[in-house]
Amino acid sequence: MTSIQTSTYQERLAETLPRVRERIERAGEAAGRPSGSVRLVAVTKSHPLEAVRAAIDAGLTDLAENRVAELDAKVEAFGKEAATWHMIGHIQSRKAPRVVAIAELVHSVDSPRLGEKLSRAAVDQGTVLDVLAQVNTSGEASKGGFELDGAVEEIHAMAELAGLRVRGLMTMAPFVDDEVVLGDAFAALRRLLDRLTASTDRIGSELSMGMTNDLEIAIREGSTMVRIGTALFGQREGSAQ
Ligand SMILES: *Cc1c(COP(=O)(O)O)cnc(C)c1O
């Protein structure tokens, strides 16, 4: 983490946040979607506490981290009530109980096994956890998530688990610039959600898709939540993530 001062993040957000909101609004309009139908989830991962402070002060209410330890540190620093905290990265099974305790929406349930661990932890803690099933829509081996083949059955099964509420699906687009390939990946997620919701009312209608470089395409394909880091906070130090 760097030690950029709060004012730097405040100044940065004063510039970047209106631009990001504008991009979301325009993309929504172009897709004929009602204003306000896409939620902005601000990804503060690998930025310091000052970035979180500035985000909260700027009125960002949904904040996301991709590592449990970092989420933990930030929730600890600001309190659970300070924001809606999202977990968007891979979770080791043994950390499931901690995630249940601190996250409000987990986007990254990437296997039936993790679903079961989170279910058990939520039941133990007497709570219900909102989750999204992460789906590997690109087929890239490096991407985690439910494979499209078999996803319907596996996600249906997960939606039956106690202590979990499956609010929808999440995907990461492939690392390419080709808009057709990106659009295909997002459309595949939307079609999968259509199939799931046609046969059960236990699965919600959220589609978490779209990041800094592809939010317009994701919104065109039906995204209800974009996860934006770089466009808000700048490049992350020393990481390609
Ligand atoms: C880092 C990250 C993002 C944000 O990516 P940017 O390109 O910086 O907007 C979104 N989703 C996940 C799962 C991430 O890990």
Image (spheres, helix red, strand yellow):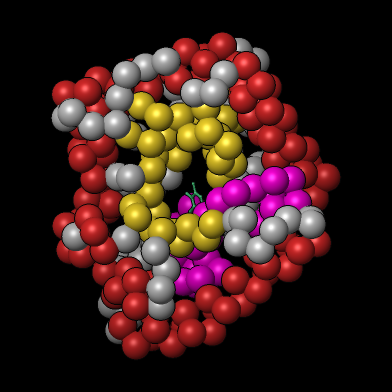
Query: Residue at (41%, 34%) from the top-left corner?
Result: 131
For the record, the magenta segment spans: 214-241
**Is residue 215 on the magenta stretch?**
yes
Residue 71, given in percent of the width and then of the height, sits at 28, 52
**Is residue 223 on the magenta stretch?**
yes
Residue 74, given in percent of the width and then of the height, sits at 24, 59
Q: Nearer the viewer, residue 3 or 113?
A: 113
Residue 140, given in percent of the width and then of the height, sits at 63, 31
Q: Nearer the viewer, residue 20 or 229?
A: 20
Residue 207, quarter of picture:
top right
Whether residue 1 is visible:
yes
Residue 4, quarter of picture:
bottom left
Q: Nearer the viewer, residue 107 or 89?
A: 107
Query: Residue at (70%, 46%) from the top-left corner?
Result: 222
Query: Residue at (83%, 45%) from the top-left corner?
Result: 180
Query: Residue at (65%, 73%) from the top-left corner?
Result: 22
Above or below: residue 175 compared with residue 228: above
Above or below: residue 88 compared with residue 2: above
Residue 52, quarter of picture:
bottom left
Whether residue 89 is visible:
no
Quarter in which the N terminus is drawn: bottom left
In the figure, is residue 91 to the left or right of 200? Answer: left
